[in-house]
Each structure stands twice: as C-alpha cells, then as structure tokens.
Image (cartoon, grey):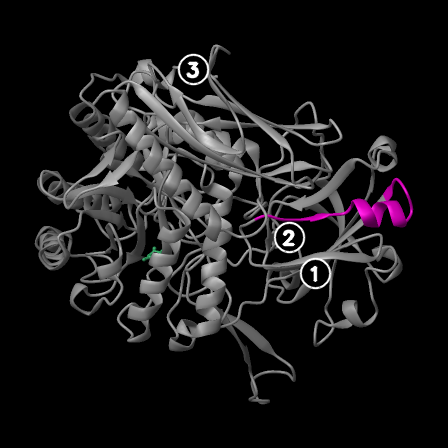
C-alpha cells in the first residue's frame, strides 16, 4: 500500500477518533505534568487522620469536621499519603474499620498562583477508596464515587475567596461497599444479641483481596492557564513505513484558541506537525511501539507537544508520549502491529506490606524489574485500574496491559440492576478517558468472574461491552469468566475469551494428574462454542514459601511447580491453535480478608509479598524466555535484555 492507502487509513482513523470523542465524559483527565505553562506541587506526605468511630459514622458530618482544623475536633493521628490506613497502626479497629475516615493537611500555595488571575489551580487525588468528599478551607469542592481512578476540582475561586495562600485540605473517605458500588458488597447488621453487641455489623464482599482503604495515590496541586488543554485523544495506525497519529484536542476556557501539535522523535527531531485541534499526523519511516521481547528496539515513544494559544496570547503547553501501534483480533490470534502476540505474563495486585494499596515507586520499579527478569511481556490489572504511573512505566518498557475495571465479585442478582449498570458504564468512561492514550493498554476488561450465568448478565454485558466499544473502537473488549461455558451469557459479546480455572486446587484438590484432561476439555468447549481466541487469564496454586514435599503436596513449592508444569503442557499444544496467552495467578502473594482458606493472605504468588522468588518463579522464567525466543522471531538473550536501558 502506498500513500493513498495511508490516506484512506488516516480518514478512517480520524472518523473513529471523532466518534469516540463525542461520547466520552465531558471533561478530560490528563495526567498532571509540568510544562512551560504548568506547575505541579505534590502535597502527599504526612497528613493527619481521624476515623469517625461514632455508631452511625456520621459525627464528622454532623459536627462539620471540615469547618475547623481536624485536631480541634478530637484526637488525630499521623497518616502517610499515599497509603492504605489499615496496616499503619497497631490498632485492629483501624485495620478493619468500615465507614468514614477524615484526612487533613495544611499546605502553602505559591503566592503567584493566587495573585495571577489567569492561573487556574487544580486539586487532584490520584485515587481514594471508595467514596470521597473534598473541602478546601472548609468549602466543599467536589465528591467522587469509586476507588482506583482520579478525581479533581478547580479550586482557584475558593482559594482566592478564602484565606489566601493558606490552604487546608480536608478529605473524608468512606470504604463502605454496597450492592451498587464497584466492587459490590453488603453491610450486614448482626441482630442476635446473644452473640453480637448492639449495632454490630460486618462488610461482606465476594472478592479475594483485602478491602484496603484510604488515599491510595498522590495528592497534587497543579496549575494551568485559564484557557487550557482539557483533553487529548490520540489513535494510531500505520501503513507500510508511514505511521499515522490522529489527534483530537479539547480546549476549555477559550472558544477560539489556536492549537498547534508537534510530534518529535526520541532524538528530539520534529517528525510531523499540524495546526488545528484535530487532524492526522503522518510519520515517515515510523518507529513502531513494540512489546518487550518482540523487537530489538521495543517501546518506542514519540513525544507529542500540544500548544493552545488563547485570544489573550497565553499559551498552554502539554506533552504526551505517543506510541504508534495497532491491535487486532482474529478468530485465533491477537495481533500487535499485524504480528501474532502471545501473552506470557502475570496477574498483579497493588499490594504490599504496611502501605497496602498505597502507591510506592520502589515497589513499582522492583516489580517491573522482576517482570523483565522473568521474561513476562504482559500483565492484567486484576482487579481494578492501577496507578497511571504504572501504565507510564509499561509504555516505556513495552509491557502489554489488559486494563481491568473494578467490576469484581458481581455475584448477587441485585448487582445487575439499572443503577449498578449505570455506575459501571460511568466507571468504564472514567477508565477509558484516563487510559486511552497508553500504547501499552491493548484490551479493556469490564469485569472479573461475574455471575455471568444469571439471566440479567446477557443484557448487562451486551450494554457494557458495546458502550466500551463506543468509547474506544481501537481496542478489543473482554471480561474474565470462570463460569461454565455452556451457561455463560456474556461471552457472545466479547472479542477474546478470558478464562480462569484452578484444576487440582479448588476442583479435585491434590490431583494434578487430572489437569491435562480437564484443561483440554475447557479449551475445546470454549473454542467449539465461540470460535474466539482464548487467554488462560488465571491459573495457579498456593505455595507457602519454604514448605517442601516430594511427591508434591498442596501448599508446597513443589506442588505449585507441578500444577504450573501440567498447565504448560496443554498451553504448548493449544497455543499452536487458538490459545493466545497465559497469565499466572499471581505475580506475588497478597493480603486477603481473614478466612479459613487463607493463611495471612493468598499465597499463589510466584514471588512472596516481599518480592522474593519461590521455585515457581524460576520455572516461569525458563518458560517465558523460551517462548519469547520461539514466538518473537528474534534471538533474545536474557543478559542483553535485562541489562538494556530503556528508550528515554
Ligand atoms: C480467582 C479470582 C482471584 C482469586 C483467585 C484465588 O478466580 O479471580 O481474585 O484470588 O481466584 O486464588 O482464589
């Protein structure tokens, strides 16, 4: 195809981008970065904290704790941000607390931000679990439903009207889950007075990780000019050696801003530019974004600088990394840049000692090093959206992501109602709005193991999948199923079948000799019914580090290894046909709620919670590097890739 082919592709791309933009949420959610027109001030760190222990958890609101310094309302303690609050103290009541907790921090806002009326000051929370209300100097500025996704408020007006540079930020966060939240949960009051004191209640959930709560990601103050770049949407494709980047820029605060877009290569060379808020950039001799281990030069990122100049002459500048690549699905393959891609990767959690789900750079970098060490080319953000910084790392290292929303544990028929569906659609909008520009994200997952055999699931998933496609037509959509293939009502709507199974663990415990037969049956049944490519999206076994037995017994490192080997034998047959990936459950051990089937958390990690390898990690390492050599069509050696510097 010559340049006319490229032109046709460009037109299609522009149309797709315009259609998707019309349907997205109204405002954008660009990751705050510094630029000549923008400043960022991180106000994470040490905050003060108070849990509302009143029976109804409502005292804070009744007494308006946001009106005065929190320390004046009663006893407060230190609390780091970002971090879950649960494991910070020695108090089991705080660990297991359900209801409203209050955070507060006094910060200084640079005087020039306040004085310059052309400056817009925004307060942004990377995520807080689950329902949050935000006040600045006692004035409510926003509220947000849902964990794992960012929210923000323009606080310029409040700051200028209240006490100048001083800024008291108060955030109330409630971790209660209901039938209509994502994930869902129920609050159960225990009424048998012979067993429970008055007012005793518990939070029930249907998911297998600890319901960590608090402010989980950084809290930032940032500025933009009044007329500012609110959102940018890019979609990419290529034809021969020409890369095409369609862009759509939305500017708020000015109806006539002049927009200029410049795309630069990694050496700083400008490779394409355009005027106007939408268009298509053409890049000759394109360097495509390739996954790790699929190319000698993976994860190539261009840099797209957007300038918007308003009538008053002020210019806002925002720079977005752009990876040019395509994703397609056939009935037997997953194609990245038209080449078959096999997912050999992991499922993760945002989870660690002490900080719980709190964002932590050392942990993030260590995890990427471990993934690259073991030859993993992908991970799934089980069971909720991860921090944007993690997606940025994946973009830069070429690690492919299946991006999952917090639709985990949807088991109760009442959670398939209209209110739940409406919230789920909104969460997908927030997720796509936040993550649409990441080249690493190749597929959306709308849920994990819902009760997809219940009659409402058919309608529910039809809506959910088609809405997600209308938000982003450039990526496939899936959900993760564990139900029986014959009774699954959502599978007709997805692009890829993702299936979890735990043969010889939850079924036929101890009988690893059955895995081969049962796994073959699983694959043949699903493929026979739907003719869609299949990812084994979870499989594994608990291993308590240091427990050994031969012949293997459950919970030992040998047993975990044996389960994995038996699965791998089948994968090696089926990946010649329609199996397009395998994701181990789990990358690392992680915390769960207390139960008789969990010994201080889930131990299916191939690394411990402290990121030390179990025997299974070495087995997977051998396997993943071997698969990379077989499938990538290039000879990759561990030493060349693990020591390779990233493309920056
Ligand atoms: C699953 C779930 C995951 C659990 C895992 C297990 O199917 O998707 O959240 O942690 O099984 O270990 O039980």
Q: Pointer 2 and pointer 1: residues touching (CB < 8 Å)? A: yes
**What stretch of residues is rendered in magenta?**
150-166
Q: Which mark is residue 85?
A: 2
Residue name at image x 19 percent, y 44 percent: 562
Q: Position of residue 122 (x, y in %)?
A: 72, 42
Q: Pointer 1 and pointer 3: residues touching (CB < 8 Å)? A: no
Q: Is residue 556 above or below residue 628?
A: below
Mark 2: which secondary structure?
A: loop
**Residue that mark 1 sits on:** 101
Task: For marks 2 and 1, give the one nearer the viewer.
Answer: 1
Residue name at image x 26 percent, y 29 percent: 337
Compared across the picture, whether 123 is left or right of 638 comes to: right
Compared across the picture, whether 268 is left or right of 379 comes to: right
Q: Is residue 496 above or below residue 173?
A: above
Q: Is mark 3 within 8 Å of ligand 1?
A: no
Q: Position of residue 458 (x, y in %)?
A: 28, 69
């Amino acid at each position: 195809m010559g340049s006319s082919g490229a032109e046709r592709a460009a037109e299609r791309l522009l149309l797709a981008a315009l259609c998707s933009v019309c349907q997205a949420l109204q405002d954008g959610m660009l990751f705050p970065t510094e630029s000549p027109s923008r400043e960022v001030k991180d106000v994470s760190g040490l905050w003060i904290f108070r849990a509302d222990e009143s029976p109804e958890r409502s005292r804070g609101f009744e007494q308006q704790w946001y009106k005065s310094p929190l320390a004046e309302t009663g006893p407060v303690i230190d609390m780091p941000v970002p971090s879950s609050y649960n494991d910070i103290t020695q108090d089991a009541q705080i660990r297991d607390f359900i209801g409203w907790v209050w955070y507060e921090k006094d910060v200084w806002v640079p005087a020039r931000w306040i004085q310059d009326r052309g400056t817009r000051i925004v307060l942004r929370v990377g995520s807080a679990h689950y329902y949050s209300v935000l006040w600045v100097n006692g004035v409510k500025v926003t509220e947000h439903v849902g964990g794992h996704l960012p929210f923000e408020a323009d606080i310029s007006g409040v700051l200028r009207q209240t006490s100048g540079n001083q800024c008291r930020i108060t955030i109330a966060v409630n971790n209660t889950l209901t039938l209509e939240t994502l994930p869902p949960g129920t609050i159960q009051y225990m009424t048998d007075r012979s067993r429970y004191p008055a007012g005793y209640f518990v939070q029930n959930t249907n998911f297998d990780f600890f319901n960590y709560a608090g402010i989980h990601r950084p809290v930032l103050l940032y500025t933009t000019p009044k007329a500012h770049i609110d959102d940018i949407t890019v979609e990419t494709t290529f034809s021969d050696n020409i890369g095409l980047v369609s862009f759509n820029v939305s500017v708020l605060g000015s109806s006539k801003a002049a927009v200029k877009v410049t795309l630069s290569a990694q050496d700083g060379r400008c490779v394409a530019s355009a005027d106007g808020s939408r268009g298509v950039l053409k890049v000759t001799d394109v360097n495509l974004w390739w996954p790790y281990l699929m190319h000698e030069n993976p994860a190539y990122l261009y840099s797209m600088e957007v300038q918007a100049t308003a009538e008053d002459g002020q210019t806002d500048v925002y720079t977005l990394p752009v990876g040019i690549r395509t994703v397609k699905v056939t009935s037997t393959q997953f194609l990245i840049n038209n080449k078959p891609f096999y997912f050999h990767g992991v499922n993760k959690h945002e989870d660690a000692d002490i900080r719980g789900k709190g964002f932590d750079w050392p942990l993030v970098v260590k995890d990427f090093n471990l993934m690259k060490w073991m030859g993993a080319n992908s991970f799934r953000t089980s069971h909720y959206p991860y921090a944007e910084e993690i997606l940025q790392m994946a973009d830069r290292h070429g690690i492919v992501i299946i991006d999952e929303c917090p639709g985990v544990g949807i088991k109760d028929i009442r959670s398939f109602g209209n209110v739940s569906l409406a919230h789920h659609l909104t969460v997908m909008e927030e997720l796509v709005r936040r993550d649409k520009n990441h080249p690493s994200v190749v597929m959306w997952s709308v849920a994990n193991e819902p009760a997809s055999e219940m009659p409402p699931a058919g309608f529910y998933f039809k809506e959910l999948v088609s809405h997600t496609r209308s938000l982003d037509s450039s990526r496939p959509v899936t959900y993760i199923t564990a139900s029986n293939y014959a009774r699954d009502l959502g599978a007709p709507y997805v692009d890829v079948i993702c299936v979890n199974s735990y043969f010889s663990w939850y079924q036929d415990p101890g009988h690893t000799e059955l895995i081969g037969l049962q796994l073959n049956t699983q694959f043949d049944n699903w493929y026979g019914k739907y003719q869609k490519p299949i990812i084994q999206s979870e499989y594994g076994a608990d291993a308590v580090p240091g427990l050994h037995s031969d012949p293997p017994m459950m919970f030992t490192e040998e047993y975990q290894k044996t389960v994995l080997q038996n699965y791998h034998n089948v994968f090696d047959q089926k990946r010649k046909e329609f199996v397009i990936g395998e994701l181990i459950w789990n990358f690392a051990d992680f915390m769960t709620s207390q139960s008789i089937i969990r010994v201080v958390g889930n131990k299916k990690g191939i690394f411990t919670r402290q990121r030390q390898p179990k025997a299974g990690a070495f087995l997977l390492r051998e396997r993943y590097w071997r698969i990379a050599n077989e499938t990538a069509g290039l000879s990759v050696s561990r030493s060349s890739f693990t020591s390779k510097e990233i493309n920056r």
